[in-house]
Image (cartoon, rainbow, N blue to C red):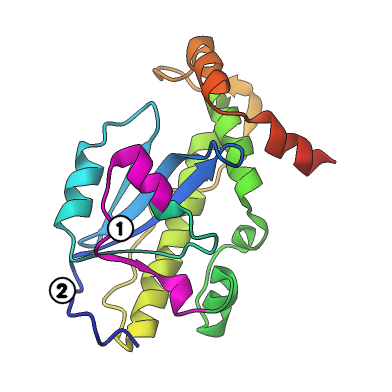
């Protein structure tokens, strides 16, 4: 139970971050969050950080499910965000997030059971190379993880979930023959810059071995 927290339950920032890159060079490629019962998202190279930072800072608490316990370190480095009001549900749930969801009988897409960080890296590379649907897939996974975090939090608190909130993203079949159009990040220059800054090869090579 989290009875030590006195929170306004409609002012909590629930979020999931898509982390990519090799160990020591990780960064957040995309974030989906639920705040005041509204969905928002941020994507590296696409969105400004003003809304993310403002909503984070004005929240009574920020909540995630970080099994590797690295998200806040990256959030601090990448966005200069503080963690004074951060709650990591892994401290209260000694299990994988989808296992917790099954324990409390939450419905979720079966694709979440097999999704791993290596898949985030693959989707991110596909996105910056221009493959259709890759970013939408990343946001879909993050939104569903955020939805599970939202429900698990209230279960841990012993509170009734206020409302089930519609998830605005859908999982689309990616077509490598179709390119995303009219996007500022679909270009070789950004891909080359990101390759120089972050080593994508190592995790992908390891996964293929």
Q: Is residue 24 left or right of residue 39?
A: right
Residue 174 spot, x, y in % from top left: 62, 35
**Which sits in the foreground, 104 or 29?**
29
Give neighbour class at mark 2: few <14, some 14-19, many 20+ (Cα, 10 Å).
few
* Residue drawn at (49%, 60%) of the image: 69
Question: Can residue 179 be seen?
Answer: no
- Counting from the top left corner in percent of width and height, residue 178 is at 60, 22
Number of callouts: 2
Instruction: Classify mark 1: residues with Cα within 10 Å, few (<14), some (14-19) or many (20+).
Output: many
Q: Which residue is mark 1?
A: 34
Asked if residue 99 lies in the magenta stretch, the reply is no
Residue 100 x/y as whole percent: 54, 77
Q: What span is in magenta?
A: 73-93
Q: Determine whether 200 is above or below 15 in the image.
A: above
Pick whichever, 111 or 50, lies toward us.
Answer: 50
Q: Residue furthest front?
A: 24
The image shows residue 105, relative to residue 143, as above or below, that is below
Q: Is residue 60 left or right of residue 40?
A: left
Q: Secondary structure at mark 1?
A: strand
Look at the image and tell me whether residue 131 can be seen: yes
Badge 2 element: loop
The magenta stretch spans residue 78 = yes
Answer with mark 1 or mark 2, whichever residue precedes in sequence: 2
The C terminus lies in quadrant? top right
Q: Residue at x 49, y 36 (%)?
A: 135
Res 42 → quadrant: top left
Residue under label 2, please give it.
8
């Amino acid at each position: 139970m989290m009875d030590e927290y006195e929170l306004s339950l409609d002012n909590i920032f629930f979020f999931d971050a898509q982390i990519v890159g090799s160990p020591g060079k990780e960064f957040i490629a995309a974030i989906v969050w639920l705040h005041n019962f509204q969905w928002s998202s941020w994507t590296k190279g696409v969105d400004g950080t003003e809304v993310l930072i403002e909503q984070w800072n004005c929240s009574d608490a920020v909540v995630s499910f970080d099994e590797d316990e690295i998200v806040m370190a990256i959030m601090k480095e990448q966005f200069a965000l503080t963690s004074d009001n951060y709650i990591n549900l892994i401290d209260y749930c000694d299990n994988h997030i989808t296992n917790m969801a099954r324990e409390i009988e939450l419905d979720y897409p079966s694709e979440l059971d097999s999704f791993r960080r290596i898949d985030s890296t693959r989707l991110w590379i596909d996105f910056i190379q221009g493959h259709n649907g890759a970013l939408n897939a990343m946001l879909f996974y993050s939104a569903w993880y955020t939805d599970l975090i939202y429900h698990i939090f209230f279960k841990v608190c012993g509170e009734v979930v206020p409302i089930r909130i519609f998830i605005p993203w859908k999982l689309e079949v990616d077509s490598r023959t179709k390119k995303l159009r009219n996007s500022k990040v679909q270009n070789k220059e950004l891909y080359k810059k990101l390759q120089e800054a972050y080593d994508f090869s190592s995790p992908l090579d390891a996964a293929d071995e």
